[in-house]
C-alpha cells in the first residue's frame, strides 16, 4: 500500500476496525475510506456494488460483522449466520468485480473443531464437529475462510487473505452485558459491582475454560503487514495469537484487580462453558513477522481506561 492508496476499512467504529484506522493514520496513510452502517448496509448487495463502483477502493479490511459472546450466540444463531454470510458474500463478489488488489477477511477460532488438539494448527480446520453454542457464527466464518481460498483458486488471484485472530480486546469493544465477549463483559460486571457497592459478582460456567487473548492493536499491526506482503502469502488462512492462554478464572482475577473490585466471585455452573480450550498455533505467521505482543495486564489496563473515558457518564 502507498500512502495515498484508497483503503476501505469496513466496520471502522468497531474493536478491530478502529484499531486498524488508528494504525493506518499513524503510519501515514491518508486515503482511508469509511462508512457507518446507516450510509452503507453491507448486507445489501446493490448498496455494496454501488459503493465499490463509486469509490473504487484498492485495499479492503473486512472487519464488519455481527459478533457476541455465548449468551448472544445462543439466543440469536440465525442472525449471526445470516448477517455475517450476507456481508461476506456481498463484499467478496464486489471485490472480484472491481479493481481491489487485496482484501483481509477475519475468521474466528469458533471455526475449529470443539475438541481440537491444542494448540490449534491451520491444518486442523474442518477436521471435527464445531462447538454447538456458536454454531451459526462459526458456520459463517467457515464459509468465509473457504470462500477466500476458493475465489483465489477459481480466479487465479491472491486478492483474498484469510486470518483467524484469537479472542481480541481493546478500545471500542462492545461492553453490553448480553452481547459482549468475555473481556468486555467482565470489565463491565466488575465495574458495575464496584460502583454499586455489591459484594458479589456471578459469572457464567465453571471458570475452567482457557482462552488466548490478543490486544486489537496487535492484530491491526499484523494485518497491515500482511496487506503489504500479500504477494508472498499462501492460499490458506493464518492464525494470529499471542501464544499464551489463561483460564477464565485467571482472567476474572486479573480484571477484578485492575477494576478494584474486592468482593466475592461466584461461578454459575448451570451455564455453559463453551469449548474448553482455544489456543492457536501461530508459528506460521510468526515466521513472517516477529512482533512483540502487548502484555495482557497492560492491554487490560488500557482497555479499562478507555471504558472509563468513553462509556461512563
Image (cartoon, helix red, strand yellow):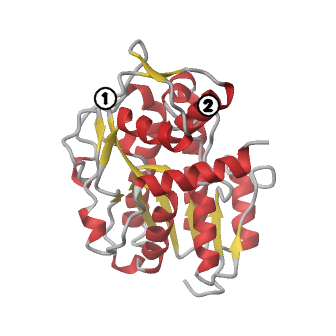
Q: Residue at x 47, y 68 (%)?
A: 223
* Residue 240 placement (x, y as % from top left): 36, 59
* Residue 258 placement (x, y as % from top left): 51, 44
Q: Quadrant of residue 229?
A: bottom left
**In this rendering, would 148 be left or right of 280?**
right
Q: CA distance from mark 1 to mark 2?
A: 24 Å
Q: Tell me the number on the disc at residue 128.
A: none
Q: Secondary structure at mark 2?
A: helix
- Specify whether residue 133 is in view: yes
Q: Which residue is mark 1?
A: 208
Q: Residues within 10 Å of mark 2 (few under 14, many from 20)?
A: some
Q: Quadrant of residue 17?
A: bottom right
Q: Nearer the viewer, residue 101 or 221?
A: 221
Lower position in the chain sequence, tag 1 or tag 2: 2
**Relative to 240, residue 2 above or below:** below
Q: Residue at x 75, y 50 (%)?
A: 37
**Relative to 17, residue 137 above or below:** above
Q: Nearer the viewer, residue 94 or 14?
A: 14
Quarter of the image with the N terminus in it = bottom right
- Specify whether residue 81 is in view: no
> Hey, which residue is sitting farthest top in the picture?
270
* Residue 55 placement (x, y as % from top left): 73, 72
Q: Residue at x 24, y 35 (%)?
A: 128
Q: Secondary structure at mark 1?
A: loop
Q: Nearer the viewer, residue 206 or 309?
A: 309
Q: Quadrant of residue 85?
A: top right
Q: Residue at x 49, y 56 (%)?
A: 299
**Relative to 37, residue 225 above or below:** below
Q: Tell me the number on the disc at residue 194.
A: 2
Amino acid at each position: 500500500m502507498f500512502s495515498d492508496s484508497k483503503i476501505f476499512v469496513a466496520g471502522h467504529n468497531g474493536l478491530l476496525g478502529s484499531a486498524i484506522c488508528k494504525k493506518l493514520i499513524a503510519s501515514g496513510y491518508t486515503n482511508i475510506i469509511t462508512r457507518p452502517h446507516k450510509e452503507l448496509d453491507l448486507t445489501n448487495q446493490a448498496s455494496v456494488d454501488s459503493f465499490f463502483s463509486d469509490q473504487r477502493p484498492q485495499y479492503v479490511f473486512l472487519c464488519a460483522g455481527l459478533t457476541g459472546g455465548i449468551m448472544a450466540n445462543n439466543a440469536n444463531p440465525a442472525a449471526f449466520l445470516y448477517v455475517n454470510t450476507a456481508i461476506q458474500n456481498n463484499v467478496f463478489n464486489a471485490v472480484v468485480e472491481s479493481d481491489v488488489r487485496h482484501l483481509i477477511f477475519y475468521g474466528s477460532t469458533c471455526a475449529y473443531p470443539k475438541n481440537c488438539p491444542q494448540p490449534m494448527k491451520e491444518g486442523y480446520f474442518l477436521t471435527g464437529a464445531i462447538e454447538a453454542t456458536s454454531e451459526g457464527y462459526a458456520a459463517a466464518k467457515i464459509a468465509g475462510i473457504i470462500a477466500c481460498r476458493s475465489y483465489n483458486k477459481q480466479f487465479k488471484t491472491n486478492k483474498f487473505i484469510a486470518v483467524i485472530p484469537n479472542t481480541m480486546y481493546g478500545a471500542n469493544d462492545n461492553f453490553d452485558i448480553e452481547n459482549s465477549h468475555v473481556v468486555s463483559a467482565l470489565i463491565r460486571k466488575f465495574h458495575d459491582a464496584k460502583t454499586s457497592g455489591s459484594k458479589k459478582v456471578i459469572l457464567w460456567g465453571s471458570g475452567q475454560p482457557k482462552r488466548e487473548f490478543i490486544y486489537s492493536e496487535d492484530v491491526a499491526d499484523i494485518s497491515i503487514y500482511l496487506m503489504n506482503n500479500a504477494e508472498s502469502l499462501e492460499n490458506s488462512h493464518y492464525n494470529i495469537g499471542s501464544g499464551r492462554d489463561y483460564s477464565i478464572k485467571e482472567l476474572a482475577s486479573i480484571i477484578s484487580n485492575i477494576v478494584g473490585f474486592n468482593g466475592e466471585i461466584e461461578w454459575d455452573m448451570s451455564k455453559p462453558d463453551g469449548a474448553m480450550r482455544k489456543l492457536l498455533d501461530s508459528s506460521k505467521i510468526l515466521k513472517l513477522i516477529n512482533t512483540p505482543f502487548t502484555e495482557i495486564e497492560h492491554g487490560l489496563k488500557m482497555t479499562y481506561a478507555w471504558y472509563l473515558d468513553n462509556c461512563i457518564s
